[in-house]
Amino acid sequence: MEDFLAQHSISTKIQVAWGEMDALQHVNNSVYFKYFETARLDFFNQINLLADLKTTGVGPVLSETNARFKRPITFPDSIIVGIKISDITQDRFVMHYTVFSQSQQSVTTHGWAKVVMFNFKTGQKAKLTPELLAALSQHQ
């Protein structure tokens, strides 16, 4: 686990809930996108990406997301979702998620999302600010 944490400068710990399991007795595939969302918002808050959303109207939207399942997760467990950033351009970036099961001591899932900055006031894509570029670059 120490290696996993060392590879991800920002990670989010999440408790697996009993109700997240399906009839096959493992966490349902749709729940992983909730885990990704929780980690994504934690990451955004830690780099202050959402701080000016109300005043500027500019914020992130997902244009695409994906998950690759390697091992099932079951209750009880705690997972850690680590995030890395890649493919930073003027108006978008890719977030990579890695899910680590504490009970299995193993990576169970990989995922990614393309995130586009969007101006909700104008309905147009928006450029990443220099501050956001710098913050994202620290997590490549």
Image (cartoon, rainbow, N blue to C red):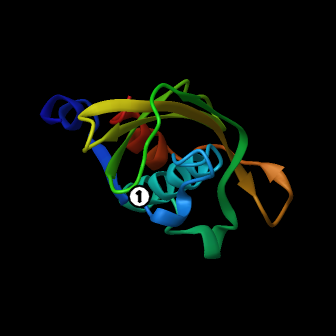
Quarter of the picture holding the N terminus: top left
Numbered disc 1: secondary structure: loop
The residue sitting at 48% across, 25% down in the picture is 70
Quarter of the picture holding the C terminus: top left
The residue beneath circle 1 is 16
Asked if residue 105 lies left or right of residue 44, the reply is: left
Task: Residue lying at the far right in this picture: please name it.
Answer: 123
The residue sitting at 45% across, 64% down in the picture is 17
Label total for image? 1
Vertical relation: 65 (above or below) 121: above
Asked if residue 74 lies left or right of residue 68, the reply is: left
Question: What is the x, y in percent for residue 29?
Answer: 62, 43
Viewer-nearest residue: 119 or 21: 21
Task: Residue lying at the far left in this picture: please name it.
Answer: 2
Viewer-nearest residue: 61 or 22: 22
Vertical relation: 70 (above or below) 43: above
Question: What is the x, y in percent for residue 36?
Answer: 52, 48
Viewer-nearest residue: 121 or 81: 81
